[in-house]
Image (spheres, coloured by chain):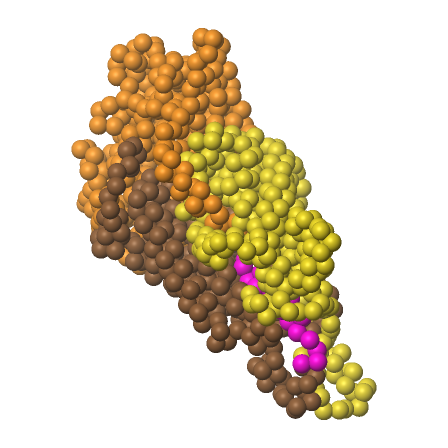
Chain colours: A brown, B yellow, C orange
Amino acid sequence: MFGERTFVGFQNFVTIFTSDPMFWRTVGNTLLFVVLYVPLNFVLALGLALWISPRIRGRGLYRLLFFLPAVTPIVANALVWRLLVQPNGVFADIASWFGVEQFNPLGTETGAMAAVVVMSLWQGFGYNMLVFSAGLDSIPDHLYEAASLDGASAPRRFWHVTLPMLSPSLFFAAVMTLITSFQVFAQPYVLTGGGPGVATTTMVMYLYQRGFQLFDLGTASAVATVLFAIIALITAVQFLGQRKWVHYE
Amino acid sequence: MSSATAQRPDTTRAIVQPRDLHDEYVPRPASARKRARLAREITSQVLLTLVLLLFLMPFIWMLATALKPGNEVFASPPSLFGSEIRWSNFVDAWTFVPFGRFMWNGLVVSVLGTLLVCITSVFAAYAFARMRFRGRSGLFALYLVTLLVPQEVVVIPMFIFMQELGWQNSYQALILPWAFTAFGTFLLRQFFLTVPRELEEAATVDGASRLRILLTIIVPIAKPAIGVLAVFTFINYWNSFLWPLIIISTQDMATVPIGLNSFLGQQGNQWQLLMAASTISMLPTALIVILLQRHLVKGIALSGLGGR
Amino acid sequence: MKRFVGAPLAAVGALALLAGCSGGGGGSTQEDGVTTLTFSMWAGSTPETEALETLVGLVEAEYPNIQLELETAPFNDYWTRLAAQASGGTEACILGVQSPRATSIRELLLPLDDRMLADAGIDLAEFDSAIVEGTQVDGEQVAVPYDLGPLIVFYNADAFAEAGLDAPAEDWTVDDFSEAAAALSGDGKYGYAINPTVDTTTAWSLTLGGEQGVAADGSLQLTDPAMVEAVAYLQGLVADGSAPQLPATSDSYNALNSFVAGDAAMAIDGPWQLAYVAEQVAFEYGVALIPAGPNGSATPVAGSGYGVSASCEYPEEALQAISVLTGPEAQTALAEQGRAFPSRTAEQPAYYQGAFAIAEDTLSAAGATGEALRSTANFTQVNTLFNQYAVSALNGDMTAEDFLGTVQSQTEAGAGQ
């Protein structure tokens, strides 16, 4: 723990891969979070960007308000969510109108992960929405007019004009969102403490626990290295794949 | 993100043009079309406002909690308002911990940090965009790779480094480690690539130095992108939690997120004060975003984050 | 959105590692006969910090040749920062030590032998024996305690009266407790809010089965029958609606919050919460002993003290400062503010005044039956995993044996590293 550092070769990696009961759980939890969070984030961000983008009066204000949670301290955000979702909180009260007796999402493994995902979406999707809004704003009108003249329906225009023109924004957002979602830490740290059980202990949270609570920097660094490798791999794949679907002018 | 964008003739091309996605091409009588559109717009507005209210509920609850007596925060069943509206919680939150001091520290660190990040990013981005040197692409890739490293990983070596310099518990330790960001460099480089070279070539012929070209030609054009970078950098410094937690050891140097944590003490939690403090802590960043709202979306669109 | 500031200068940081980690060593200097020592302690609010500054003043008045530089952090953050400082070799000279965490940071602490203590004028016989034991690791004193906290039951006297129940008697039993909890539950209210921690569970395992989750020899034995019985008992309370379901949370005061809000009529916590409870509640409250099991009442005792870091260059001066920090005057001052229940037996009466007078009988009785809460070197991990899995167990998603076995095996697997 403390004291002299010694070189142990790959021992820390061998340990987390073979005998550490927690490591693979945290990899699984992180992947589950990413798989849930990233697509939902995109659907919400793109959906709202499209909704607010056309001539909605005061769209600047709407965009701003949806972006607000992204700029407030994440500690404050997670704390207020804790008040909302606890068993005697507001959400439980609302659930009781619909006949749900025991509303306690943080008391079950699936519920806790769902709460972390929902809270993260609330906190995070506004940023992508802003990026998409900017992308939508800069699509020239004449493209839509030309498509309309060709008799393209609204879905077809979306598919053949909006998406290709937006693809650079989508690519940028995909890269950044994937990187940050693999690094998710503050939300479970403040909201669930990683529980119940280890259901919401993510990789970064685990390396934090190892490194800062248990003073086990060796294992923490090994976890960090694996995380880094995963993120690097996925980002590389994204960059390689971008030629297939990202259209620059 | 591609050299193709470099050929764009006019980078400040207008981007905001109202447009109706649902515009039907089939002609209809003008008045009926107008009415239908109006109805659609009203429905859309009402729905959007409802969604927004739901979305803002956590903030509403934050503010409502901040105004309750302490023992009613967890009252069951929960209600938005307590038995009285206690504005004094804000005063108490301000004095329960030296919150004014936290805000001041946060402002100093965020403002100076933002300035530094903008300056270093402009220089680094210019070098990567315009100057030819051996190993440029390799170095740029290395820069980008640092984006992939979680902050939690860097904190310990950085802490040891700061100790070696004797900088623990200081403003420079809060600011400098994060004053050279790959993100800023990346963002501005992408933007600089879109600036037509002809602009600079003319200046070069007139004998202007590179620094002069950068400051008088590139930077003014890049204002929207630099603005976006500044907003996000400020927010990051303001909200940063783990690093201040470790490097700061006295209360008079602490920043706002650390300050928020002091309400969760060993002796009970002062939730109403915590929520009051949270509300206050939101103000600076919210204010910046509100003031720069118009430029933010435009800046994102122009800087290449919007893609084009 | 730390996404952008997230990662820079990793390379520079790595260089710093390569450059070697000499570390400053204890943060102390000596100049013109004055020794300056860093003093690191947890404190959140302004009053807490001010109380510490008062203590620093006492030290400097008593020893003009010593100056203390106070460093503070909120309680939870204190340990995070201590870990970071330890990895850099720059922890403070005088460290706040909480007894259950003493074992886990023993390598940072200088063992204090009798001669050193005597030289500094500290006589441990004047302190409560349970907490003196609690601040030892393998028989070595690593800190001098300034307060102690036997766990006690906080109860809502108004709720008891409303339900037609007598206030808990000094000799009340676990059966009395269960009956009261059941009678106090209903209509969204609960008799008892459970704190899913090792300490609270240990209170029940001590009273029900006379054993702790850590054996006398310091080995972890979470699956001891007494612990299983305690968890099963708590599971029963949740199952029959006498205690609310638990949420997973990093908030260690969830139970106390419910109590203060009047949602739960009883909660178990330490006397250090009395000041908070007294300030917050809008009802009559009282405190009682942990109800007696087959072998009478028993309660785990934890507390805090100050230790000298092993890297401190002036351990003698540091211990002199600690003799004042834990001395009669300092303890009386803290007791009168209700900040700490004194570890010095002679100073304990100073605590029983004003709002805290109601605790006198209970605390003196608890002191007599208290047993030091034992801990292991990896107790932080035990605590973390215990809290996390207890949520599933108490909500009925895991059996008591499964729960305790899982925490035991996962900590052991981690301990090998």
**Mostly what secondary structure, the magenta segment?**
helix
Quadrant in the rendering for residue B112 = top right
Q: Residue at x 38, y 25 (%)?
A: C25
Quadrant in the rendering for residue C84 = top left
Q: How many marks?
A: 0
> From where the camera sits, is residue A217 visible?
yes
Residue A132 higher or lower than C239, as above or below: below
Q: Residue at x 55, y 65 (%)?
A: B1
Q: Residue at x 48, y 21 (%)?
A: C69
Residue C313 higher or lower than B72, as above or below: above
Across and down, in percent, residue C41 comes to 44, 28
Find the magenta span and give its range.
A122-143
A133 within the magenta span: yes
Q: Is residue C230 left or right of residue A246?
A: left
Across and down, in percent, residue A12 comes to 26, 48
Front in this rendered view, residue C84 or C159:
C84
Furthest residue toward right? B31
Across and down, in percent, residue C13 comes to 43, 41
Front in this rendered view, residue C104 or C6:
C6
Which quadrant does the C terminus of chain C fall into? top left
Front in this rendered view, residue B149 or B35:
B149
Across and down, in percent, residue C190 comes to 42, 50
Front in this rendered view, residue B77 or C43:
C43
Q: Residue at x 50, y 15 (%)?
A: C57
